[in-house]
Structure formats: structure tokens, C-alpha cells
Image: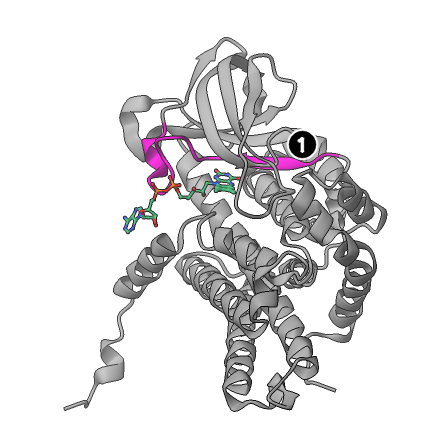
Amino acid sequence: MAWDALTDEQRELRDLVRALTRDRIAPRAAEIDASHEFPWDVVELFREHELFGLLYDEEHGGTGTGTLLALVAIEEVAKVCATSALILAVQELGSLGLKLAGSEEQQQRYLPRLASGEWLCAYALTEAGSGSDSAAMRTTARRDGDEYVLNGSKRFITNAAVANLYTVFAKTDPEAGHAGISAFLVESDAPGFVVARLEPKMGISGSTTGELTFDDCRVPAESLLGEEGEGFKIAMRILDRSRPGVAAQGLGLAQGATDYALEYARARETFGKPIAEHQLIQAKLADMETACQAARGLLYDFGRMVDAGIEGPELTKASAMAKLHCTDTAMWVTTEAVQILGGYGYIKEYPLERMMRDAKITQIYEGTNEIQRLVIAREMLRESRAFLLAGVA
Ligand SMILES: Cc1cc2nc3c(=O)[nH]c(=O)nc-3n(C[C@H](O)[C@H](O)[C@H](O)COP(=O)(O)OP(=O)(O)OC[C@H]3O[C@@H](n4cnc5c(N)ncnc54)[C@H](O)[C@@H]3O)c2cc1C
């Protein structure tokens, strides 16, 4: 048996998720992609088997099993269905604001419902005119007595129309740049809040991606997360911890595509032998497997860092490196896997064209991979390595 870096307990839980995924989600994946419908049956499955709980502490109704195991679960689900894996990753993305900056009262009100999966959540930062440059946002929030009044819109929000709770970023002081942004918890039935439309997409077709509008949307003053002006800091702390969820989705796609291509290469014959015996195919398989394992090293290291309580620039860099490498690997490996299947890779009877389409988004959302490179380089430029060069002529 292959060497496995997980503990016995982690392995046991991973194997449970793996079995559930193979039995119940794999047979649904093509249908979810073709129907473009949000898979409520998968949400129900996650609820029944308490998989949402993997994202939360015991005191809030979760399993308290930590970040590494949550990432492993997302990876396992993404091996067969990236849309289903995203349900877990976005539950984490949408609740991290509460976990990191929520008051005791806010946490008690929402986290148990999110941990059971009774409620789904979302993270609303991007706007039509502000994606990578999120501080250019135009949505505003004005204090009015015991309420805040939100006006503006958000674009490309995952879980739009299925989430019960949205973490929304808006400017409480439009003149103050980053420092003028605040974060709010907005329930889906808040007056003035509407999901204006859903976007048709290239991949992750069962996931909803929508535009939210806030038209004099009134929320209680207690909906503010943290303090006024802390929103940008909160948004970035959330992304540091959530991006590896996308990395896990990418890694799952890459490993799932590698596994599928390997089995196909064993069975498909050309020139009188299985294509797996042609050295050019072997080279592809070897490079794909190596890329997956290298990506896994970065991702699991990140999980262990969070579980060890590490914070700050070191975590930011590790998060960006895991996101960058796992998702670039997803795009490259799924493309190679399609190539191994030849014409069959391109048609919908086989899952690889779906995996290749699904892989593309992982390089774009939660910070494009260009932005991840900027983050990594920024952290490198803050480090001093002069001592390593001592004595180098
Ligand atoms: C399916 C889907 C789901 C999404 N889900 C969510 C969600 O749940 N919540 C949310 O808030 N957002 C979400 N997004 C938004 C996503 O995070 C943004 O699309 C992404 O951050 C890029 O922003 P943009 O599209 O405005 O591109 P832009 O910022 O306009 O970037 C365009 C191009 O320029 C590059 N670029 C930009 N700035 C620089 C720079 N300084 N140096 C080098 N290159 C640069 C980018 O890498 C990109 O290639 C989602 C998007 C999609 C498509």
C-alpha cells in the first residue's frame, strides 16, 4: 500500500468521504453538469453524513477535526464532482468572517446552523467594476439609527439564491480607500436584497453564480462584523484561509483526471498494445502524478500550519502557493488527461472534458493566479535571506 501522510483517524474519515463520494456523487456528476441545476440532493447527503461539520469547531456543532481534514474531504469530492466539492469550499468561505471576526452572539446565532448544513452561506466581495482590485468597490453602507442601509450590487457570487446568509463588503466611508470598507452579515430575506440574475457558465455548472442587488437594504446594526473600517482586513484574512479550499478542489480535479486517464490507458490499445505501454503516454502519466503529489505537499502543509495555529505572512504565502500550484496543476493535468483519451476525451460521454472545463475556474476565483503570484512575490520581498549568502563569492 502507498505511504500515507495522514493519521489513522484522518485516514478513516477520508475513506468514509471517498466511499460516499464514489457511491452517491460520482453517478450524479455528469447529470449535475448537464442540468445546470443546483444539486440539493448532494447538500442533503452532506447534511445526513455531517460533512458540513468538518468545517467547524465542536463548540459550534462541528467535528473539530481541523483544516487539513476539511481540505482532504474537498479534494475527495472534487475527484468526481467539482460542483459538489464547491458546496463545501463555499460553506467555509462564507462562514470564515464569522469564525474570525464574529461576536460571541453572531457565532452562536449562525455557526450551528451552518455546521449542520441547515443554512448555506456565501461571500460577496466582487462587483462588476472591482474584482482583483476589490478596494475599488462602490457598494455603500450608511448607518441610520439602529440599522445600516446598503446600496449597490455584487457580481459573480457563488451560492447566490441558495444561500441563507451572505458576508457582504461595503464602504461605510467611501473616501477612505481600504480603510473605509466594512463587513456585514446579510440574511437572504433582508428587505431590499434581491438576487437579480444567475450567470450561465463554462463549468461548475450546478453551482449558482449570481448578481446581488442592495436597494436601500436595511440590516440591523448588529450585522456589522468586527468594527467599521475593518472589512478589507477581514476580507483578506478570510481569503488567506479559504483559497486552499479552491486549491483542494483543483487538486481533486487533477488527481481524479489522472486516475481516470491511467485506467483508460491500460484498456485502450493502438498499434497492438495498450497505450499505457507507449512511452510518450507513460511520460504524461508520470508527470501528471508527480505534479499532483507536489501540489498535495503544498496543500497539506497549509492545512497543518492552520491546525498548528500559525498566522500572519507565513500563512498568507503558504495559502497563495497552494492555490497557485494546485490550480495550475488542475488545468494542466486535466488538459493532458483529455489528450490521453484522444477523441474520447473531447466528448461528453467521458468525464474529462467536464473536468477540464471545471478546472479553469480554479485559476480565476478567490484571487486569480496572477494575483497569487503577486502575493507570493510580495511576501518574498519582505523576507531577508542575506544570511544565506554569507560567504558566497
Ligand atoms: C464562477 C465564479 C464564481 C465566483 N465566486 C465568487 C464569490 O463567491 N464571491 C466573490 O466575491 N467573487 C466571486 N467571483 C469573482 C472572482 O473572484 C473574480 O472574477 C476574480 O477575482 C477576478 O476578478 P475580475 O473578474 O474582475 O477580473 P479583473 O480583476 O478585471 O482581472 C482581469 C485580468 O487581469 C489580471 N490582473 C488584474 N490585476 C492585475 C495585476 N495587478 N497584475 C497582473 N495581472 C492582473 C487578472 O489576473 C485577470 O487575468 C467568482 C467568479 C466566477 C467566474
**Apparent side of residue 285 relative to residue 108 in the rendered image (left or right):** left
The residue range painted magenta reads: 119-137
Q: Decide: is 191 above or below 261.
A: above
Q: Position of residue 368 (x, y in %)?
A: 40, 51
Q: Decide: is 84 above or below 342.
A: above
Which residue corresponds to the image point at 56% horizontal and 81% vertical from the top-left?
285
If the picture is divided into quarters, which one holds ligand 1? top left
The total of numbered circles placed on residues is: 1
Q: Residue furthest top?
A: 145
Q: Can you see residue 308?
A: no
Q: Depth check: 128 or 192 in front?
A: 128
Q: Decide: is 350 above or below 149.
A: below
Would you say the magenta stretch is mainly helix, strand or loop? loop
Residue 251: which quarter of the image?
Answer: bottom right
Which residue corresponds to mark 1?
162
Q: Where is residue 353 in the image (x, y as percent from the top left)?
A: 58, 59
Q: Can you see residue 90?
A: yes
The secondary structure type at the circle numbered 1 is loop
Please check the rendered image and state whether residue 361 is part of the magenta-colored stretch, yes or no: no
Mark 1 is on which residue type? Val
**Apparent side of residue 309 relative to residue 129 in the rendered image (left or right):** right
Q: Which residue lies furthest to the left in this view?
A: 393
State yes or no: Cβ of the residue under disc 1 lies below 8 Å from any atom of ligand 1. no
Q: Depth check: 83 or 302 in front?
A: 83
Which residue corresponds to the image point at 29% horizontal and 67% vertical from the top-left?
383
Q: Depth check: 380 or 391 in front?
A: 380
Q: Position of residue 76 (x, y in %)?
A: 69, 63
Which residue corresponds to the image point at 58% horizontal and 31% vertical from the top-left?
166
